[in-house]
Image: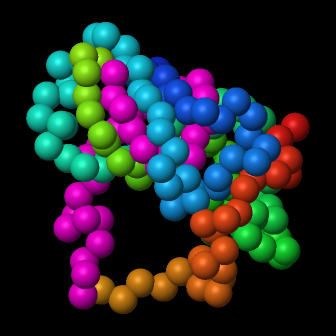
C-alpha cells in the first residue's frame, strides 16, 4: 500500500499548553473555549458552516511518538487493544473531537468544549449531524467502557502517553 500524506488546514488553539492535567474528552471540557486558525486558502470552505452548532474536528496528535497495540486507557487499570480505546499513541496519531461552534470571523472559528492541546494541527472538520451519526432507534454497545463512562467528566490526563 502506498503511504498517505496529509497537510494541516489550520491550527487548533486552546488554553492547554501541556497534555498533563487536561480533559480527556470533550464532555470533560465543558465550557473550555478555543479557536481554530484556518489557513487563509481554505476560508471559502467555511461557507454555510455558521448554521451548525457543533463540528467534528479531525486532527494530528503532534506530540505523540510511537505506539503500542495494547495500552492502559485513562479510565481503566487493564490493558486494552489500541483500537478499543481513544488513546493518542496510535499507529496513525489521528484524533477526533465534537466541539461546539460559537462563531466564525473571517478564517477564525471560535469553539467550545475543547479537549485538544494548544498548537494541534487540524487536518479536517465536518459538521456534526446527529441524524447521520446515530440512528436514535439503534441500540449502541460501548464494550468495556459500559461501566466507566460516568468517570470521564472529571478525569484529567496524566503522563502515561507522553514520552
Whether residue 161 is visible here, answered yes or no, is no
- What residue is shown at x 67% (from left), y 65% (from top)? 154
Q: Quadrant of the C terminus?
A: top right
Quarter where residue 125 is shown: top left
Quarter where residue 94 is shown: top right
| Front residue (pair 29, 3) | 29
| Front residue (pair 155, 68) | 155
Percent of width and height locating residue 14: 56, 32
Above or below for 44 versus 156? above
| Front residue (pair 7, 120) | 120
Percent of width and height locating residue 58: 45, 41
> Is 156 on the left or on the right of 104, as rendered?
right
Whether residue 88 is visible here, answered yes or no, is yes
- The boundaries of the magenta stretch are 108-137
Question: How many marks overall?
Answer: 0
> Is 74 on the left or on the right of 46, as rendered?
right
| Front residue (pair 67, 118) | 118
- What residue is shown at x 24% (from left), y 16% (from top)? 106
Percent of width and height locating residue 129: 23, 58
Above or below for 76 versus 92? below
Amino acid at each position: 500500500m502506498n503511504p498517505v500524506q496529509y497537510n494541516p488546514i489550520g491550527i487548533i488553539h486552546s488554553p492547554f499548553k501541556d497534555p498533563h492535567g487536561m480533559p480527556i474528552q470533550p464532555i470533560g471540557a465543558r465550557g473550555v473555549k478555543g479557536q481554530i486558525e484556518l489557513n487563509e486558502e481554505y476560508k471559502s470552505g467555511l461557507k454555510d458552516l455558521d448554521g451548525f452548532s457543533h463540528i467534528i474536528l479531525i486532527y494530528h496528535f503532534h506530540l505523540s511518538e510511537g505506539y503500542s497495540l495494547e495500552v492502559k486507557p485513562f479510565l481503566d487499570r487493564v490493558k486494552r487493544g489500541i483500537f478499543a480505546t481513544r488513546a493518542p499513541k496510535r499507529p496513525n496519531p489521528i484524533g477526533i473531537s465534537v466541539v461546539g461552534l460559537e462563531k466564525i470571523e473571517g478564517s477564525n472559528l471560535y469553539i467550545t468544549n475543547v479537549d485538544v492541546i494548544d498548537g494541534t494541527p487540524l487536518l479536517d472538520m465536518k459538521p456534526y449531524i446527529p441524524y447521520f451519526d446515530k440512528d436514535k432507534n439503534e441500540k449502541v454497545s460501548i464494550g468495556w467502557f459500559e461501566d466507566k463512562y460516568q468517570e470521564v467528566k472529571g478525569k484529567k490526563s496524566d503522563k502515561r502517553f507522553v514520552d
